[in-house]
Structures are given as structure tokens and as C-alpha cells.
Amino acid sequence: MTQLDHPGAVPASYAPGPATTNLADILERVLDKGIVIAGDIKIDLLDIELLTIRLRLFVSSVETARRAGIDWWETDPALSSRAAENVLAEENRQLREQLAALERGEAPGPDGDGGRRKKAVRSGGGGRGRRAEDGDGT
Amino acid sequence: MTAGLPVAPPDRRPEPSPPDDADGTSLCVFAVCAAAPDGPPVQVAGAPGHAEGGPLSLLPLDGELAAVVQEVPAARFTEEALRRRLADPAALESCARAHHAVVTAASAAGPVVPLPLATLFADHRRAHAVLTESLPRFRSAVDRVRGRAEWAVKVHLRRDDTPPARATPGHGTVPDAVAGSPGAGRAYLSRVRGREQQRVSRRDAAAAAAQRVHEAASAVAAGSVRLRPHGQEITGKDRVQVMNAAYLVDEARGAELAAAVAVVRAEVAGGGIEIEVSGPWVPYSFTAEEQR
């Protein structure tokens, strides 16, 4: 169940183990667990923590979008080849904007107030929680 | 496949290259596993490691333990490059799954102690030096997980269908005609209180169910650990995670754990409580020294 199949991704067939190897389960194990050895290249744990939060937001967005029938990014090869660029971050931000609009029951519009949204995402889900509470089940 | 992983001697690269050498390679360590010379060969069939890296190999640490390693392009695995790449959900997913696949595949031959994603060294010599410093930790971890697997158990409470109470006038909660009459406020408050009580009692029932699941699973397990519950971002807004736990279970007793949990599941059926079991996992959650 590779969610974003793109060149370089490991196909699901390469992942033996439990059938329900969802990404959240894998991440909480490969990031948080095991014996931590100080390697030569240091990755700040705090950074990784932030990454997981960001990813959780993304996973959630993917699920929400799938339910709404939006899956264009899964088949767009351009998206993954630009992965290393800021372009993808921009795409993600726009995607979140559109999803937020969808959740509010509006048609997905083009771009919104970028700065404000970015801030909301960084603040770690408080904004999302409020939005979910207020959502009317669209 | 009968051939095991090729064994790379620690002195394979006599002149260590600095980690920031843009043209060179770094060494990614996935796991430490039991690899006695007379034991079964360690294989990682079907798990290629990181897409941009070379073939996987085995770095012997002592007579019994070896690390599963892969040479990767140093430039793609610097701190800066990793921070940038892992901030991209697709790249993070691909890295995490590649790491998990190698760890899981290696576990087919025997006990495996996973290292966190992207544990990197300048070269074989550095990896060997640092990993051998921790041999006692690896030995005790290997002994702890030998012949055992991790099973994940999660308990969720489905949200009540009752809409959240709102005190906003004109929102449809209180009809206007009644809103003006005496006692309307009290009736409204009592409704709110009723909903709150219902919510609390559902929570209590879910907590009790989680406790029973935990007791049933623990009776079969050699160890247990509570993980941080997933937030709404993962569970979806229609349910709350009340328990996220992992159990260390003898390989032969996995089905027993599933059966024990299924008994509780049947007992609490109908209360909006969902119990999920997944496994067997490589015992990721049971290799660190401190176990709660």
C-alpha cells in the first residue's frame, strides 16, 4: 500500500511483514525506535519530530482528498521528479489550501493566503483540530 | 536464493573519505543482526535498500553479530540533503519503507536489532568502530528479541453521532419559540449536560475496554510498551485512539495473542470500540534498553 508510487519508491511487494503496514505504523518505528547510535551524519531528533507531524498532516490530507475523489498527484510523474525542489512544498501547500476549502464545503479555489496557512501548519495541528470540530461532514 | 549477503571487511576502504565528500559514498546502517559463521546466511531477498545506493552487504562486528549496510552517495545523505529530502512526504515514505523492508527481510534469518532511519557513517571503518563500542547493548537486545516478534494493538473509539452542543443562538439547537419561554435555558443546559455525561461514559467504557485488551495481550506477551497514541490526523476525525501498544510475543504465540484480543473485541462489540491487531513486526519497540 505504497501511497505515493513514484520512481525510486519501494513497491509494496518489497515490504514483507504485517499486511497492514501503514505508513504511520512504519514511521513511528523507524524514526523513534531501535538502538540509537550516534552516526557521523547527525539528524536532529527534533527535526524528525517535526517531520512526522508534517507527514501526519499530509497523510491525513491524502486520505481526505481520496475520499473526495482527488488523486491527481498520484499519477503525476512531474510531482515526484521535483521532489527535491521547493516546488513540491509549494504544491503541498496549495493542496492543503484546496483541502481546507473542500472541508469547508467550498469548491477548490486556486491559491489562498499562503503565509497564514503555513503558520497554521507549523503550529502543530491546533488549527486542524479546530477545523475538524467545525467541519460539517462534507 | 541461497547465497547470503556479501561480507565487507572493515578495512575495505583504507582511506576514509570525509562525510562531506561530494563524489564519495557514505555508509548507511540498517540493523545489527545475529550472523554466526555457522548460522544461516543473512539474506535480504527483495529488499534493495535505498534506491540510490549500492548493493547491501554485511559488516561483521564480532563472531556473532554483523551490521546490514549499504553504500550510498554521500552528497544525497548529508545533513542538509536529508533534512530537505525527508521534509518531502513522498521521499520520507520511500526512505522509511526502504529501511523497513531491509530490516524485515533480514529478520528472516534470525534476530534483528533495527537502527533508526538514516544512521550514517563516513565509511566501513567508522561504522565498525562506533558499532563495536555498543556491542554489549546489541548483544542484550538480540537476546531479548530472539525468537520473538512484535504485535501492535490499537484501540479506537468511534465518535458519537450526536452533533456537538452549541450555545450559539439561531444555530438550530434551540427552537426560537421555546428559546424565549421560561425554563428554556435550563432545558438546554440539561441537554448539554446529558450529552457531556454520555460522552464521558463512552470514554470510560473505551478506557476500560483498552485496559482489558492490554491485560489479555499481556498474558500472552513477554513484554509490552505503550506508544504515543496517534492524533486525529491519522485516525481520521470520526474516531479517537485510546490505546496504541506493542507486545513482544514468542513466535509460536502470535495467533494466541490475536485470539485473546478477539475475545475482548467480541465482548465490547456495539459500543463504538474498534480494536486492531497488526503483526508480526520486527521487534522495533523492544530493542532499546529502557523498557517501561
Image (spheres, coloured by chain):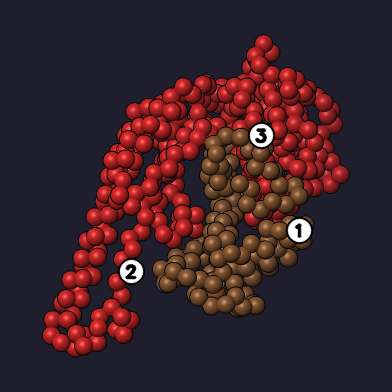
Chain colours: A brown, B red
CA distance separating discs 2 and 1: 42 Å
At x 24%, y 65%, the residue is B195
> Helix, strand, or loop for circle 3?
helix
* B73 or B50, nearer to the observer: B50
Callouts 2 and 3 close, C-beta under 8 Å: no
Residue occupied by mark 2? B163
Amino acid type shown at disc 1: Pro
CA distance separating discs 1 and 3: 26 Å
List x then y, in percent, for residue A123.
52, 65
Say whether mark 1 and mark 2 are on the same chain. no
Residue occupied by mark 3? B102
Compared across the picture, whether B19 is left or right of A2 comes to right
Farthest residue toward the left? Answer: B182
At x 43%, y 24%, the residue is B253
Work out whether B9 lies above or below B228: above
Could you say which disc has been placed on residue B264 in the image? Answer: none
Could you say which disc has been placed on residue A77 in the image? Answer: 1
Compared across the picture, whether B287 is left or right of B8 comes to left
Say whether mark 3 and mark 1 are on the same chain. no
Work out whether B197 lies above or below B168: above
Tell me if residue A76 can be seen. Answer: yes
Callouts 2 and 1 close, C-beta under 8 Å: no
Amino acid type shown at disc 2: Pro
- Binning the other alpha carbons within 10 Å of mark 3 as few (below 14), some (14 to 19) or many (20 upward) gives many
* B180 or B221, nearer to the observer: B180
Farthest residue toward the top? Answer: B38
Amino acid type shown at disc 3: Val
